[in-house]
Image (spheres, rainbow, N blue to C red):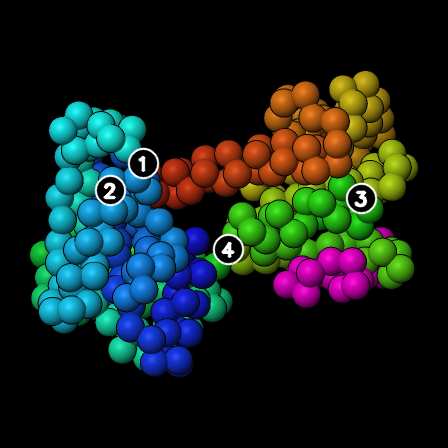
Amino acid sequence: MTGSIFQSLAAAARNGEFVAFGIITGVKGSSPQKLGAKALFYPDRKIKGTLGGGCLEAEAQRLALNSLKTGKPETFELVLDHDFGWDDGLICGGKVLGVIIPNAQKLGEQFWNELATRDAAKTWGVKKDFSIALTDSSINHQLSTINSTDWLYTETITPPCELWIAGSGHIAQAVAPLALQLDFAVTIFDDRPELANHEIFPHAVALRVGHWNDILNAPFPAAPAFGLIVTRGHKHDALVLETWIHRPFAFLGMIGSARKARTIAEHFVKKQIATAEEVARVACPVGLKIRSQSVMEIAVDILAQYIDKRAELVNEQRATAAGKVELV
């Protein structure tokens, strides 16, 4: 992931390691990786991250090792057709453009840590002269920079989407560490300190422990937030939902059966706790139907749905940003 690549660049700067930084700067048609995919190539042939695997990555590594020897940047434009990708099964039919920057770690540990922290939106990029720099932090500049003739590639780093999980039982214990690996910032909410603690959950997981009436009204994050309700029973699920159904989650899911969903929906509408439209936005049963049975399988099918909803949100944000650029 982008964050771990930046952390590795900061570590390379700290440890005096030499690395070549590869970025996919353009994609046309079908390809094994998306725009902005990143990898670090080390002199001992170790690779962190990926530009797409197979013959594409092998060619990028060849260029990267040469770049480390010469100290000169490299660009590449590869057509993934029969001639290029037959042996590795990488016959996608698309075109991939990229750049290799030798010794990007020389920008310093502080520079890369600033991007890795992701505490606020920051735009950085690779200029036409192959230098790497931050751009102006204003929104208008971030939007217009994308089309600037000065840059080969630009990217806006934003804080990770939040995942608020109500409940600290076996489902939450399986979902939380996996969600961290999938680039969600995770917070657990529960009234049971014997379960909601860092002996059970990774230290990167934030904990809000206390009476439900107190913790459910926590300040809402600035980053897009997703909610998941997996408490110890229907009563507590409904208690959490009474508050969270009115909070501006990008997506809100609750574990349970279709019958449970109907029962709670009817009760909420009848008691005027929420409108029919608000209730309809709650995904219950949460997750994709992949015939999951074990706890870890359930965690996977839940997070598959959240990944999909996050991608949908990102696409909407990009479309909105593109519209603003056209108006500039």
Q: Check disc 1 and report its element: helix, strand or loop.
A: loop
Instruction: Give residue 56's mark.
Output: 2
| Region of the chain picked out in magenta, as a range | 197-214
The residue at the point 24 percent across, 42 percent down is 56
Nearer mark to the viewer, of 1 and 3: 1
Decide: is 54 above or below 269: below
Nearer mark to the viewer, of 4 and 2: 2
The residue at the point 21 percent across, 59 percent down is 64
Decide: is 294 above or below 56: above
Disc 1 versus disc 3: distance between alpha carbons? 35 Å
State the image quarter where residue 82 is shown. Answer: top left
Few, some or many C-alpha atoms within 10 Å of disc 1 (few <14, some 14-19, many ≥20)?
some
Residue 192 place in picture, x, y as percent:
88, 56
Disc 4 versus disc 2: distance between alpha carbons? 29 Å
State the image quarter where residue 79 is shown. Answer: top left
- Kindly identify which residue carries mark 3: 170
